[in-house]
Image (cartoon, rainbow, N blue to C red):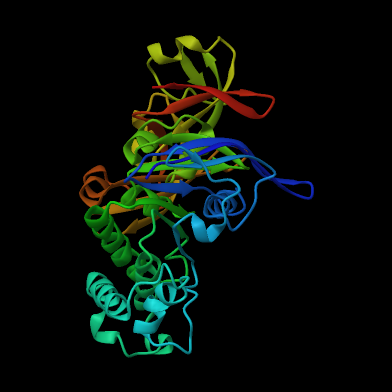
């Protein structure tokens, strides 16, 4: 089932939660709504579900206007962050609840309800807990039961609001894999709200980046990570180093250094003298010993080397007046080979970066290098 929202605007007092958002969610896909807390993603989810009303705009379900359709008639399954299970009902009755409260004419026979609930408990691999109360379950088990309850009414759309936000990191990772496998089996059109970048990139078919009630970028996980359209997207998706400077002869000049040695054709669209910010991922930043740098790159001092697993993280502080902090990733073998150590003075040069022009402190058009 396809979902589309057109010109959705929602305001709470003077706060604009959604600023005329228009989006299309393809049928059968799992789409992540990703953004910081307070950006409007949960409000949009609730408007699609019918739990909230937009000030203006239209919600289309399978091409039909559902803006004034009651939540019960939208056939939407909703999974909340804090499970919302009924504490006095056992697991079986929690899953069966949505079927039992249907109007008499729509309610399946008792035998059908029991069959469907047993099948769902097997699907979420918790049929052995059918007689247990929610208080006897772990957080991950409760969330799987909440998902089974949402699926019991055979929704056309599944909406998940930070479903794993209350769980610890290990359980979240396990449930992410499980949700992806479940979706591949059921192919229900699903929208998944999260502020966890790794979660969105790992689970979804498509990612919608939201910031201050506006859509910043829409694309596959690979597209939004590899080709961020705005500085917000670049900074929000994973760790990043940034450098403020200006363009001269196609190169980025900082106040006290030249960031990279070669002019790049991608910067030709940026005018000479333009104020820019260059974004560089930790694995795209090279560490060059001070005596080999030929004054190219940013002068810095290694403050910490954290070696966990195959990759190590190197933390540095710039030697300019603002003492900016930087982060570099490389293998532990590379650290040993290059003889890097804490306290060492080095220079930082990017192997690849993304440059955005700045206009009165607002970052605008971009060019990749």
Viewer-closest of 14 and 299: 14
Q: Would residue 355 be found to the left or right of residue 331 on screen?
A: right
Q: Position of residue 170 (x, y in %)?
A: 33, 69
Residue 29 placement, left or right of 34: left
Q: Residue 345 is drawn in which quadrant? A: top left
In depth, the one of 94 and 181 nearer the eye is: 94
Residue furthest to the right: 14
Q: Total marks drawn?
A: 0
Estimate the x, y position of residue 364 in percent, counting from the top left.
Answer: 58, 24
Identity of the residue drawn at 46% across and 16% down: 251
Residue 196: image x %, image y %? 44, 55
Where does the C terminus fall, quadrant-wise? top left
Q: Position of residue 165 (x, y in %)?
A: 46, 65
Instruction: Say above or below: 110 vs 47.
Output: below
Residue shown at 42% from the left, 65% from the top: 164
Residue at point 49%, 66% (across, down): 80
- Quarter residue 29 falls in: top left
Q: Is residue 138 above or below residue 349?
A: below
Q: Is residue 82 left or right of residue 171?
A: right
Q: Residue furthest front?
A: 105
Q: Is residue 316 visible?
A: yes
In this view, the residue in front, 94 or 170, is 94
Depth order, front residue of 168/337? 168
148, above or below 210, in the image: below
The residue lying at 62 percent from left, 40 percent from top is 322
Q: Is residue 287 visible?
A: no
Name the quarter where the N terminus is drawn: top left
């Amino acid at each position: 089932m396809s979902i589309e929202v057109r010109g959705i605007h929602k305001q709470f007092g003077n706060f604009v939660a959604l600023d005329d958002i228009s989006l299309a969610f393809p049928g059968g896909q799992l789409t992540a709504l990703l953004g910081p807390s307070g950006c409007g993603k949960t409000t949009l989810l609730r408007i699609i579900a019918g739990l909230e009303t937009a000030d203006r705009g239209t919600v289309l379900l399978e091409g039909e206007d559902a803006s004034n359709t009651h939540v019960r008639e939208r056939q939407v399954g909703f999974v909340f962050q804090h499970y919302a299970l009924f504490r006095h009902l056992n697991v079986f009755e929690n899953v069966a609840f949505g079927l039992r409260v249907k109007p008499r004419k729509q309610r399946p026979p008792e035998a059908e309800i029991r069959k469907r609930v047993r099948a769902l408990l097997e699907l979420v691999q918790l049929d052995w807990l059918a007689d247990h109360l929610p208080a006897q379950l772990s957080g991950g088990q409760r969330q799987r039961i909440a998902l089974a309850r949402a699926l019991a009414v055979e929704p056309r759309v599944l909406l998940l609001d930070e479903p794993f936000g209350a769980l610890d990191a290990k359980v979240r990772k396990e449930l992410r894999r499980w949700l992806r496998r479940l979706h591949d089996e059921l192919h229900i059109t699903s929208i998944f709200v999260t502020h966890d970048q790794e979660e969105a990139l790992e689970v979804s078919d498509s990612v919608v980046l939201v910031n201050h009630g506006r859509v910043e970028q829409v694309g596959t996980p690979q597209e939004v990570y590899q080709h961020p359209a705005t500085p917000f997207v670049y900074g929000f998706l994973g760790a990043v180093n940034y450098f403020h400077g200006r363009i001269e002869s196609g190169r980025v000049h900082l106040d006290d250094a030249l960031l990279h040695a070669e002019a790049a054709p991608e910067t030709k669209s940026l005018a000479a003298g333009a104020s820019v910010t260059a974004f560089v991922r930790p694995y795209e930043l090279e560490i060059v010993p001070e005596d080999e740098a030929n004054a190219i790159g940013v002068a810095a001092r290694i403050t910490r080397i954290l070696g966990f697993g195959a990759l190590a993280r190197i933390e540095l502080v710039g030697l300019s007046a603002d003492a900016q902090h930087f982060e570099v990733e490389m293998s532990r073998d590379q650290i040993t080979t290059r003889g890097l150590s804490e306290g060492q003075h080095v220079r930082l040069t990017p192997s690849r970066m993304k440059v955005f022009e700045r206009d009165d402190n607002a970052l605008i058009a971009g060019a990749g290098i």
